[in-house]
Image (cartoon, grey):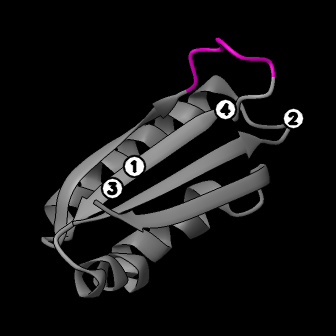
Amino acid sequence: MIRHVVMLRWNDTVTDADIAATSAALDSLPAAIAEIAVYRHGPDLGLGPTNHDYSIVGDFESVDDYLVYRDHPEHQQVIADHITGRVSDRVAVQFEF
């Protein structure tokens, strides 16, 4: 299994409504992309001062499945509509488990 983890730090212009719209858009991806085995996301609980604001975690059966997700038009549209231009920092990692 491949786990993909993304952490976002929103820029100052992002509103609660923007975050809710992002969450809704991310919720739609598992139905659109069959290669997603498990998909979770949500805002940080604010328990640490250096934490990012939002995290996305996806599990995939193989690297090939992850690559389908990464390049999928629905995923790319969510990025274009809800992520690009709204984050001040993004970090990601993929690992096998």
Seen in the picture, residue 96 relative to 49 is either above or below; the reply is below
Q: Are the two marked residues, 2 and 1, in contact with CB atoms closer than 8 angstroms?
A: no
Residue type marked 2? Asp
Disc 2 and disc 3: Cα gap in Å?
26 Å
The residue under label 1 is 57
Which is nearer the N-term, disc 2 or disc 1? Answer: 2
Q: CB atoms at circles 1 and 3 under 8 Å apart? A: yes
Q: Position of residue 43 (x, y in %)?
A: 54, 27
Three-letter amino acid code of the residue under disc 3: Gly
Q: CA distance from mark 1 to mark 3?
A: 4 Å
61 and 73: which is toward the camera: 61
The label shown at residue 12 is 2
Q: Count up the numbered dots.
A: 4
Question: How far across and down, in percent of the image, does residue 14 sit?
Answer: 74, 36
Callout 1 environment at 10 Å: few (<14), some (14 to 19), or many (20+)?
some
Q: Residue at x 80, y 18 (%)?
A: 49
Please give the name of the residue rendered at 12% of the width and 71% of the height, measured from the top-left corner. 34
Q: Amino acid at mark 4?
A: Asp
Number of residues whose C-alpha sits closer than 10 Å to that of mark 2, classed few (under 14), some (14–19) or many (20 or more): few
Which segment is the magenta one? 44-49
Q: Which residue is mark 4?
A: 53
Q: Earlier in the sequence, mark 2 or mark 3?
A: 2
* Residue 58: mark: 3
In terms of secondary structure, where does tag 2 sit?
Answer: loop
